[in-house]
Amino acid sequence: MGTYVKAANTSEIENGSKKKVNVQGQEIILAKVGGNYYAIDNRCPHMGAELSEGKLEGLVITCPRHGSQFDITDGHNVRWMKGSGLMSAALKAISSSKPVKSYKVKVEGDSVMVEL
Ligand code: FES
């Protein structure tokens, strides 16, 4: 069991949005959807692109580089890279899908806390 560390103030994240934060040297995305807060690593497990620059639609974030998608509730892989065709099939064949690390989140007063 880890320690909860303050990552942001509740007022910093609007419902339906995300924010990149640095918590003890760790790049994390905080998101608020449906009134709940979620936290995942900022770096895509494929080739390290910044997921914070991707699009958040509902509970799914899309990597801006190759289009992999992750569920922000637990980091599981929804889609492993976008596209079709020979090149895409070859890329998918040589790198199997991976989840992105997710973190437990709790709110204390006006602080959003992440378990590291
Ligand atoms: S770096 Fe994210 S899908 Fe390739």
Image (spheres, helix red, strand yellow):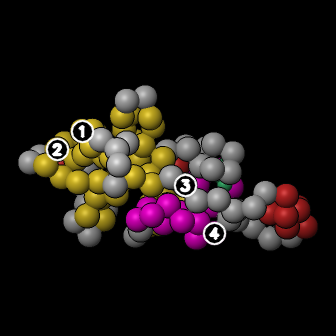
Above or below 91: residue 42:
above
Which quadrant of the figure contains the C terminus? top left
Which quadrant would residue 20 be assigned to in this image?
top left
Between marks 3 and 4, how big is the CA–CA gap? Answer: 12 Å
Disc ID at residue 6: 1
Q: Is mark 3 within 8 Å of ligand 1?
A: no
Between marks 2 and 3, how big is the CA–CA gap? Answer: 24 Å
Q: Earlier in the sequence, mark 1 or mark 3?
A: 1
Between marks 2 and 4, how big is the CA–CA gap? Answer: 32 Å
Q: Is residue 62 left or right of residue 97?
A: left
Q: Answer whether labels 1 and 2 touch (C-beta < 8 Å).
A: yes
Q: Which residue is mark 2?
A: 111
Residue 52, position as x, y percentages in the image = 47, 47
Residue 70, position as x, y percentages in the image = 53, 63
Q: Is residue 12 magenta?
A: no
Q: Residue at x 58, y 70 (%)?
A: 78
Q: Secondary structure at mark 3?
A: loop
The mark closer to the camera, 2 or 4, is: 2
Q: Which residue is mark 3?
A: 100
Q: Answer whether labels 4 and 1 touch (C-beta < 8 Å).
A: no
Which quadrant would residue 100 be assigned to in this image?
bottom right
Residue span colored magenta: 63-79
| Residue type (three-letter) at the residue carrying disc 1 | Lys
| Residue type (three-letter) at the residue carrying disc 2 | Ser
Disc ID at residue 79: 4
| Residue type (three-letter) at the residue carrying disc 4 | Arg
Q: Is residue 77 magenta?
A: yes
Q: Secondary structure at mark 2?
A: strand
Residue closest to the eye, 114 or 18: 114
| Residue type (three-letter) at the residue carrying disc 3 | Val
Q: Earlier in the sequence, mark 1 or mark 2?
A: 1
